[in-house]
Structure formats: C-alpha cells, structure tokens
Amino acid sequence: MEIFLMIVGLGLLILGADMLVRGASRMATAWGISPLIVGLTVVAFGTSSPELAVSVNAVNAGQAGIAMGNVVGSNIFNVLFILGVSAIIAPLVVSQQLIRLDVPLMIGASALAWFFGLDQHYSWLEGLVFLTGLISYIVFLIYQGKRTDSGPEPSVGMDGPPSSEETKAPPKFIQNVALVVLGLGLLVLGSKWLVDGAVWIATLFGVSEIVIGLTIVAAGTSLPEVVTSIVATIKGERDIAVGNVVGSNLFNILGVLGLSSLVAPSGIDLTASFAGFDLPIMFVVAFACLPIFFSGGIISRWEGIVLFAYYVVYVVYLTMASTSHDALPLFSFTLLYFAIPLTLVTLVVIAWRSRKAKSPLSAT
C-alpha cells in the first residue's frame, strides 16, 4: 500500500508542478510581472508550504528538533540537490537581480539564523524579526517588479512563445489562479504521500529515525521545489527554476523559522551540535551560491555536478554520524578543513576571473 502511495504521490507531484509553472508564468505575463518575481514569491512560497506545515505542527507537538532540522535540511537540499540536478539537465542562466539582491539576502538570512542560534535558543522576538524581514522583502519585490517591468514578458515554455493573438487576448485570471491553487494542492498532497511511503520503507530496512528526519523528511518536504524547478527547467522557465530555490530558502528562514518561533510557547531550544554544525553548514551552502552565480551568470553543468556531489557527501556524513562510524572523525576533518574550503576558493577564483574577463579594462 505504501509503495502504491509513493507512486501516486510522485505522479501528483509531476502534475501539480506542471500546473503551477504553467499558471504562474501566465499570471506573470498577464500582470506585467517578470517570471523571476513570480518564482521568488508565488511559486517559492507555495512550494514551501509543506515545510511550514511540518515545522509548525512539530513545534506544537513539542518536537522542535524536527522543525529546525526540516528548515535547515530543506535549505541545504534546495541548493545542493535541486540546483545541482536542474543545472545538470540544462545550464541555468542567473538573473542579475538574483546576483545583486536575492542571493545576498539569502546569505544574510542564513547568517542571521546562525547568529540568533548561537545562544542555542530562538525567542518569539527573533521570530518576529524574521517575519518582519519576510514581509518587507515581499513588498519590495512587488514594488520593484512593477517599477522595472514596462510591459508583459512573454514566457517561453515547451509550447513555444505565445502568439500575437494570445498576448492580445484578455487574461484568463480565474483559470490561471485555479491552475496555481490546484497545482499547489497536488504538490502538498503528493509530497505527503511520497514522504509517508519513503519513511515506511526506510523504517522497514532499519534506517535510524535521525537519518530519516534529516534526510527523508527534509528532502520530502522539498519535493515540490524539486519537481517544480526541474519541470520549469525543462519547459525553459529557468528564472522560475532558480528563483524558486532562492525564494524558498528565504521563506524557510524568514517565514517558517519565524512563525515556528512565534507559535512556540517559550521559543525554540537548539542542541549544541545543531547550533555549532548544522546552522554553519547552511550558511556555507548559501554563501557558495554567490561565487557560482558570479561565474558568468550561469550555473554550468560541472557546477551542478559539484553541488550534487556535495549533497551526496552530506548524506554520507549524516549516515556515518547516526551510526557513530569509526571513520567519522577523519571524514569530518577532511570535509570541513579541506574539501569545503578548497571548493569555495576555487569558485571565488573562477568568479574573479570571469568578472575580470568582462571588465572593459581587460579588453584594452
């Protein structure tokens, strides 16, 4: 029965993602808002609804560890796995707005979450700061999108660019909203069924609850982002694919973490390992986006492979940590003090060379 639910859930995810991308891109065209803005708001926040539901319910049930692990694990999964797989499918062109505004904001939000967590506690006041930042971000995006977009931007997908008759026709507002709402609903339901089935299978094979929580739950609640970004990449809506990841990470920190901290009766307590390892890793992963995005404004296939490979390494680390494997100290030392710094330095050098090559002075 659980395997059947997994298959049906995966089908609902694919169908829901297609509806969501199609409806969101049409709404962007009709309203004169760029697909990037829609990806950063409607699509990103909508596909993050499973994270919100899981975290708030976990806090109310007194399971703060699941709530925090869901947020941090989902953010790591979004960057390493989703961007990695999407870039492997097709190199992703990164908007200048993402490079100059949204990615730095994502890095700043990750740093703020790390800073607030240094005392191993998130208070309701810190949650209010997160939510205030989210509201301010949404208002700015809408204002900026309306101010900079002089007219509708036709979105190009698998069906090709819209014809002149289609662009002149009155927007089918209700139909587009229905596509977005129905797509979100299918995504949430499909992800729940797929996660339930995956947890059952993992438990059946004796995988520990810690690994299930840090990997399957975090990855499962991010399945809407996975399918949405992959479908958007295939359909040519690459602004939505990248914007979905960045927007989802911002929403996870500012919205999910903020609301979870507010609804918790006495705030959220963090473990020492979570504050000292998981939050810094989330920050490092977010920071790694900046040099990657700067390297020509394109996430190439090889960069996608690097991101995906790091997610595999991260899962291996979690598995070794949960089983207290003898090789864990050496593995952790190599990862933290050699592999990650070497990768970051390499990316920074590549980004610097790319920007130098584009500089007018370099051409003279």
Image: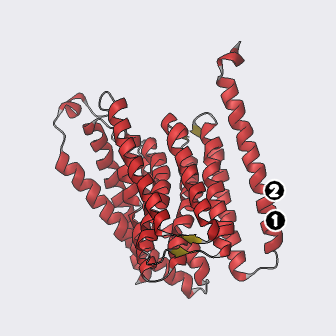
Q: What's under tag 2, amino acid-wise?
A: Phe
Q: Is residue 35 above or below residue 57?
A: above
- Which residue corresponds to mark 2? 338
Q: What's under tag 1, amino acid-wise?
A: Phe
Task: Determine the image quadrant of residue 141.
Answer: top left
Q: Point out residue 310 in the picture as x, y percentages from the top left corner.
A: 67, 58
Q: Point out residue 2 in the picture as x, y percentages from the top left corner.
A: 43, 82
Q: Residue at x 29, y 29 (%)?
A: 151
Task: Determine the image quadrant of residue 207.
Answer: bottom right
Q: Are marks 2 and 1 in contact (CB under 8 Å)?
A: yes
Label 1 crowd (10 A; few <14 / some 14-19 / many >=20):
few
Circle 1: element type: helix
Furthest-right residue in this view = 330
- Which residue corresponds to mark 1? 333
Q: Is residue 352 left or right of residue 129?
A: right
Q: Is residue 233 left or right of residue 168?
A: right
Which quarter of the rendering shows the C terminus?
A: top right
Q: Is residue 22 visible?
A: yes
Q: Point out residue 172 in the picture as x, y percentages from the top left corner.
A: 18, 44
Residue in the foreground of this view, choosing between 272 and 2: 272
